[in-house]
Image (tube, rainbow, N blue to C red):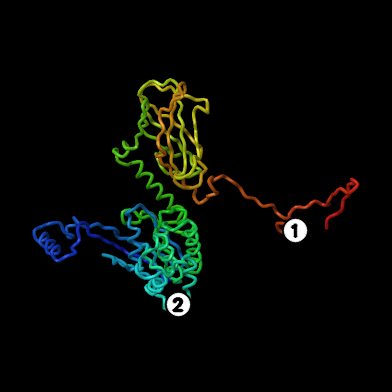
């Protein structure tokens, strides 16, 4: 299609594992090993394929998100698009001026000042000297580094590197903008400014390819997304659906983790051993990811080592750094359990968890109701990811409904309702009315 500006066709990329040949002695030793049948790239024993037969295309003015687990090949894709790497197979096409923000400090020289690096990096990205001079004040103001402009960048923090690098790339007025997870090192206010700038560029026709682990960021900008797994596209479609697919895949991977990792999740107490806290979705499958409007059942499995006739169970949930968001205590519900010696499973059903999307962590507490002694208090270790499908309304994702009253013909739209007359009380207490015009 003539409107396609970025495309990968049957692209593959491999990397060699093991030691590199950075001297003549190493090169000769490697050659001798190959002669006598040692590991080589030809037999595939020292080669890692980061990408395999990858295909996708992006049209002019579209924003494509690329998500996936670490090691899936996301950054390799951006490096191929930026021309930093060459494919070992297939074809990579990028049309027009390209700006890339892939690594903190990429294209910077540590001994040069921020001002000098603006000119150096801008020239690398294809800007003329006059263009850079004309945009210098806007670049520096956007980065918020006016005080440090004439300081060598080797004294910059990683956040300052990212701010200056993004600001230069965003003012190139590129046809194609490539952005990696590097934005995560910036402060919260600057990240918001970067997101707004990316929306502005996309609205003006720039094509964006955005690699990130922040689902909310990606969904707010990108209309379409790819999920990469092991160097191949496992899903492509609307951003919201791609996020659901990705979180579901990660949930399945966690649920089916090796037994030795599950054993590592156990939490021991003096009288009670917590074996596992797992979550079951509305379809009856174990998951660590659910939708906010979906039923979820928490199943706590534990082993009682000595009799506890009246046992209280409590489940608590919090965001990673927030105060406790939810605390369900069986004692407050006038319910105690018979803690006979042996293994037990207690279930707690939520018709839905109307929370803002994100990752939450749960912990388990248990008491002996008669003595008041705490038997178990685990860390906030058990994860549950909630997807609000873009309906975030704050900390909660509450059900709500909008309505608008129909106006009679000839009435002004959205005019506030008014009484037919205004009543007031005079100085001597008489009530008087006057019509409203």
Q: Residue 206, percent across and down?
A: 46, 68
Q: Is residue 373 above or below residue 437?
A: above
Secondary structure, mark 2, is: helix
Q: Which residue is mark 1?
A: 411
Q: Is residue 58 above or below residue 261?
A: below
**Mark 1 against mark 2, which lies toward the viewer?**
2
Q: Is residue 249 above or below residue 65?
A: above
Q: Residue at x 75, y 58 (%)?
A: 411
Query: Which is nearer the eye, 70 or 294?
Result: 70
Query: Which is nearer the eye, 111 or 295?
Result: 111
Q: Earlier in the sequence, mark 1 or mark 2?
A: 2
The picture quadrant where one finds residue 176 is: bottom left
The picture quadrant where one finds residue 51 is: bottom left
Q: Residue at x 34, y 53 (%)?
A: 70
Q: Does residue 173 appear left or right of residue 81 in this picture?
A: right
Q: Residue 35, percent across and down?
A: 9, 61
Query: Which is nearer the eye, 6 or 98?
Result: 98
Q: Residues within 10 Å of mark 1 (few under 14, many from 20)?
A: few
Q: Residues within 10 Å of mark 2 (few under 14, many from 20)?
A: some
Q: Residue furthest left?
A: 36
Secondary structure, mark 1, is: loop
Q: Which residue is mark 2?
A: 131
Query: What mark, if any, has residue 37 been given in the picture?
Result: none
Residue 96 visible, this orientation: no
Q: Residue 77, percent across and down?
A: 34, 62
Picture quarter with the N terminus: bottom left
């Amino acid at each position: 299609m003539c409107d396609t500006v970025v495309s990968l066709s049957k692209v593959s990329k491999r990397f060699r594992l093991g030691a590199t040949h950075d001297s003549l002695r190493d090169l000769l030793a490697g050659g001798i090993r190959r002669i006598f049948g040692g590991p080589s790239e030809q037999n595939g024993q020292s080669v890692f394929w980061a990408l395999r037969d990858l295909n996708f295309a992006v049209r002019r003015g579209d924003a494509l998100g690329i998500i996936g687990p670490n090691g899936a090949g996301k950054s390799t894709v951006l490096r191929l698009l930026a021309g930093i790497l060459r494919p070992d197979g297939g074809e990579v096409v990028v049309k027009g001026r390209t700006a890339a923000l892939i690594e903190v400090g990429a294209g910077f020289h540590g001994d040069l000042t921020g001002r000098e690096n603006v000119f150096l990096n801008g020239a690398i990205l294809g800007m003329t000297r006059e263009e850079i001079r004309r945009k210098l004040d806007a670049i520096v103001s956007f980065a918020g580094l006016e005080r440090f402009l004439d300081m060598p960048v080797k004294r910059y923090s990683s956040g300052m590197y990212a701010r200056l690098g993004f600001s230069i790339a965003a003012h190139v007025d590129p046809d194609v903008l490539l952005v990696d997870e590097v934005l995560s090192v910036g402060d919260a206010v600057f990240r918001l400014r970067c997101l707004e700038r990316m929306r502005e560029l996309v609205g003006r026709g720039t094509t964006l390819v955005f690699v990130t682990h922040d689902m909310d960021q990606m969904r707010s900008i990108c209309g379409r997304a790819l999920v990469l797994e092991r160097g191949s596209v496992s899903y492509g479609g609307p951003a919201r659906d791609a996020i659901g697919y990705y979180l579901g895949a990660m949930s399945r991977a966690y649920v089916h983790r090796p037994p030795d990792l599950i054993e590592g999740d156990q939490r021991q107490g003096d009288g009670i051993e917590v074996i596992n806290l797992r979550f079951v979705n509305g379809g009856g499958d174990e998951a660590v990811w659910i939708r906010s409007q979906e039923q979820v059942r928490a199943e706590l499995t534990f082993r009682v080592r000595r009799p506890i006739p009246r046992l209280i169970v409590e489940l608590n949930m919090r965001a990673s750094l927030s105060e406790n968001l939810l605390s369900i205590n069986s004692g407050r519900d006038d319910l105690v359990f018979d803690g006979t010696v042996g293994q037990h499973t207690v279930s707690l059903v939520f018709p839905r968890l109307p929370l803002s999307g994100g990752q939450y962590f749960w912990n388990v507490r248990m008491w002996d109701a008669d003595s008041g002694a705490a038997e178990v208090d685990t860390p906030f270790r058990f994860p549950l990811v909630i997807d609000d499908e873009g309906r975030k309304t704050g900390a909660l994702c509450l059900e709500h409904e909008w309505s608008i009253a129909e106006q009679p013909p000839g009435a002004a739209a959205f005019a506030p309702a008014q009484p037919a007359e205004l009543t007031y009380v005079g100085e001597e207490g008489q009530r008087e009315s006057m019509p409203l015009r």
